[in-house]
Image (spheres, rainbow, N blue to C red):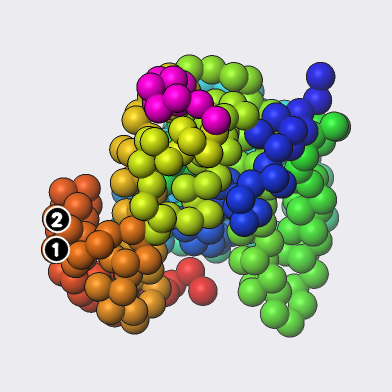
């Protein structure tokens, strides 16, 4: 049976129309960059380094998670990680959220070419009509850049290698439509093309994540399973809609029409952590975003995320993040000033 938003605890009924999935995506400040678009005749192989090396290669800002993605436009290929080998066919997309090194290949074993070598030779972004007629596989490869992923519940719920098919009928995503627009814009080479491609890559990432969240089977305890539970899903939405509220197990249980003990047990079983641990982690996620993106005083941010005093906020922030908020903000500003935005 196809999935609908009804599986996500009647998402549109959330307090304040909160959207936990959208909140989590927004807090990662997703951006993207195209690396290459080429066709290949076997045998061939491409080596993609891990996220740390890829970030250094692309000059990404410190603290940014660089996530490689690969779309097979036609033909097929193999993607190999330390976990094994998987075949990707036309219309399939693979995203390495785990950030591990991997190779793409087809045909008899050959030494894979490092992607840095391909980029340095300018082999990129040529539309399929300009490619060799003997080619059997066409790839569109790039990266998504994600910020502040370490406390993000959505990122933690994503698989190390997410694979999905563009045309999966009956599901709530438009991956095929975005992919078509992306390919057309790359081929067009029109004014503002790079800007539009970058924006389409943001949407492409969001659509791929949404396709996974909506279509993934129920598994072990985790954020996605919690969202699908009618009680826990609403509680998560309430927390996201108003992180500064003085939440307690008793308050959440009362809104859920359950006893505190039953509510806490259900929440912990679904998410694998207690309600108040989730509240604290989401508050830190919101606080870091406000510290990085605004000039609001730290005490004002502390109040907005639910702390009655600056001292209490400082203690909580340092315990969870590892540094006091003012020092963390200053370090973020220094990193941003040093970074050259080579992906623009």
Magenta span: chief secondary structure: helix
Tell me residue 105's x, y (percent).
57, 31
CB atoms of marks 2 and 1 within 8 Å? yes
Tell me residue 333's x, y (percent).
27, 75
Q: Nearer the viewer, residue 237 or 43?
A: 237
The residue carrying mark 2 is 315
Q: Residue 328 occupies which quadrant of the picture?
A: bottom left
**Is residue 190 found left or right of 248 in the rendered image?**
right
Category of crowding for the residue at label 1, using alpha-carbon neighbours closer than 10 angstroms: few (below 14), some (14–19), many (at least 20): few
Can residue 236 be seen? yes
Tell me residue 4's x, y (percent).
77, 33
**Residue extending farthest right:** 169
Q: Nearer the viewer, residue 206 or 11?
A: 11
- Which label is found at residue 181? none
Quadrant position of the N terminus in the picture:
top right
User: Which region shows up in magenta?
Assistant: 257-266
Q: Alpha carbon of mark 2 to alpha carbon of mark 1: how far?
A: 6 Å
The residue carrying mark 1 is 311
């Amino acid at each position: 049976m196809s999935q609908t938003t009804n599986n996500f605890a009647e998402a549109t009924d959330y307090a304040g129309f909160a959207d936990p999935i959208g909140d989590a995506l927004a807090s990662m400040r997703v951006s993207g960059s195209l690396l290459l678009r080429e066709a290949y005749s076997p045998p061939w192989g491409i080596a993609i380094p891990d996220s740390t090396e890829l970030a250094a290669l692309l000059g990404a800002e410190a603290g940014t998670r660089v996530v490689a993605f690969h779309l097979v436009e036609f033909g097929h290929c193999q993607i190999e990680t330390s976990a094994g080998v998987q075949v990707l066919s036309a219309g399939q997309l693979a995203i390495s959220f785990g950030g591990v090194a991997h190779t793409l290949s087809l045909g008899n074993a050959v030494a894979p070419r490092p992607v840095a070598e391909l980029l340095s030779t300018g082999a990129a972004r040529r539309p399929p009509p300009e490619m060799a007629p003997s080619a059997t596989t066409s790839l569109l490869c790039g990266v998504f850049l994600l910020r502040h992923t370490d406390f993000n519940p959505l990122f933690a719920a994503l698989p190390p290698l997410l694979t999905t098919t563009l045309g999966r009928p009956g599901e709530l995503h438009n991956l095929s439509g975005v992919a078509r627009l992306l390919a057309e814009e790359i081929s067009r080479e029109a004014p503002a093309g790079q800007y539009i491609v970058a924006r389409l890559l943001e949407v492409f990432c969001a659509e791929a994540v949404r396709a996974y969240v909506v279509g993934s089977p129920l598994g072990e305890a985790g954020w996605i399973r919690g969202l699908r539970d009618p009680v826990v899903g609403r509680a998560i939405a309430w927390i996201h809609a108003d992180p500064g509220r003085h939440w307690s197990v008793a308050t959440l249980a009362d809104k859920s029409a359950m006893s505190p003990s039953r509510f806490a047990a259900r929440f912990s079983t679904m998410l694998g952590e207690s309600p108040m641990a989730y509240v604290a982690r989401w508050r830190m996620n919101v606080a870091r975003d406000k510290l990085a993106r605004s000039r609001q005083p730290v005490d004002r941010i502390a109040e907005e995320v639910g702390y009655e005093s600056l001292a209490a906020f400082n203690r909580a922030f340092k315990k969870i993040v590892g540094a006091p908020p003012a020092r963390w903000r200053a370090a973020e500003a220094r990193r941003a000033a040093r970074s050259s935005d080579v992906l623009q």
